[in-house]
Amino acid sequence: LSAPTMSDDSLVSDPVGKPVLEYPCGTPPAPGEAHQIAPGVQWLRMSLPFALAHINLWAVRDDTGWAVFDSGVQTSETAAAWRTLFAAGGALGPEGLTRVFVTHMHPDHMGMAGWLTRKFDCRLWITRLEYLMCRTLVADTGREVPSDGVQFYRRAGWDDEAIENYRARFGGFGKLVHAIPDSYRRLFDDERVLIGGQEWRVVVGHGHSPEHACFHCPARKLFISGDQVLPRISSNVSVFPTEPDADPLGDWLSSLAKLRREVPDDVLVLPSHNEPFRGLHARLNHLERSQNEALNRLCVSLAQPRRAIDVFPELFARPISNEPNLLGMATGESLAHLNYLVHRDEARVTLDDHGVAWYQRR
């Protein structure tokens, strides 16, 4: 029914010592500038109007211009940065774009894709579920808040103030996304895509979003990870009102194992947030261990019945207030952990007379 506009801030606390990662690419570029990190590969960065204040984008030299990966959120600042990049003397010059690849549908990734594809008359490349889900969420703009959404958050334990904030903010997703293209080129898992004469393999993951596309170039030992793997923060993995019984945490953990199997450890990882890094497998192992620690703490706390909003201290390293973005993300992640246990018959859920869900360890 709606997705948080700040989709990538880290919430799960990190009890296990972090692995030592290498960050070989130096200082991030300013908006409108670019740093070359490999021949024909440019690192771009755009500002975001969220607590997580930046997104990394990547430009790869293609046959007659540039292929870009992700687009930034729809703001006047992002549009100005793109114009600077493509101006005469800009980092990407006046040649323009050949294609726009989008890893997934969140506004900081999809926001300017329609603007770019129309400006350069080029195609959007994205997986089917990400494209269709984006269209669905954009269509919520201007709609009345659905009763399913209110029921979902009441069930999680939200009070009247939180519900009113939800009503006031519903449909905000579409305000951050330029009119999306009416057609697209579908990306498939394990597909090989030629960009500038070199092969990039599509590696699809799940959990953070429905059908998230990562891109691995074996010849260059580069891996564009989107939000599926981030070096300093953990990806937001949440349950939303549209699919209240989903198991996104199970999907995400399976995707971490898939990346460990299919992407070698010697790649330079190009993430959507923080800096490019080396040490992919160490980071994957750490994320998996941290989630297991969080699930163990949660299981202990469920000796007595708890609501989704009651388990925040077991999962999150900071207090969770009624600030709408933070509360929404925390609730979604709590439900992801609780649903994970319910799906594996390690916890049960019952509804009280007010329709509030209570979870308890089996």
Image (cartoon, rainbow, N blue to C red):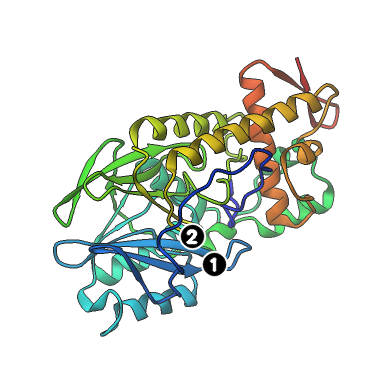
* Left or right: 238 in relation to 55: right
Q: Residues within 10 Å of mark 1 (few under 14, many from 20)?
A: some
The N terminus appears in which quarter of the rendering?
top right
Q: Position of residue 307 (x, y in %)?
A: 80, 33
Residue drawn at (54%, 28%) of the image: 250
Residue closer to the observer: 103 or 185: 103
* Left or right: 23 in relation to 87: right
- Corner quadrant of residue 218: top left
Q: Position of residue 82 (x, y in %)?
A: 37, 74
Q: Position of residue 165 (x, y in %)?
A: 75, 56
- Corner quadrant of residue 294: top right
Mark 2 lies on a secondary structure that is helix
Task: Judge whether residue 244 can be spotted in this image.
Answer: no
Give the mark nearer the N terminus: 1 vs 2. 1
| Mark 1 in CB contact with mark 2 (< 8 angstroms) | yes
Residue closer to the observer: 25 or 207: 25
Residue drawn at (70%, 53%) of the image: 326
The residue pinned by badge 1 equals: 48
Residue drawn at (36%, 45%) of the image: 214
Q: Amino acid at mark 2?
A: Asp
The residue pinned by badge 2 equals: 108
Q: CA distance from mark 1 to mark 2?
A: 7 Å
* Left or right: 341 in relation to 165: left
Residue drawn at (61%, 64%) of the image: 50
Task: Judge whether residue 60 can be spotted in this image.
Answer: yes
The C terminus appears in which quarter of the rendering?
top right
Mark 1 lies on a secondary structure that is loop
| 156 relative to 78, above or below | above
Q: Amino acid at mark 1?
A: Leu
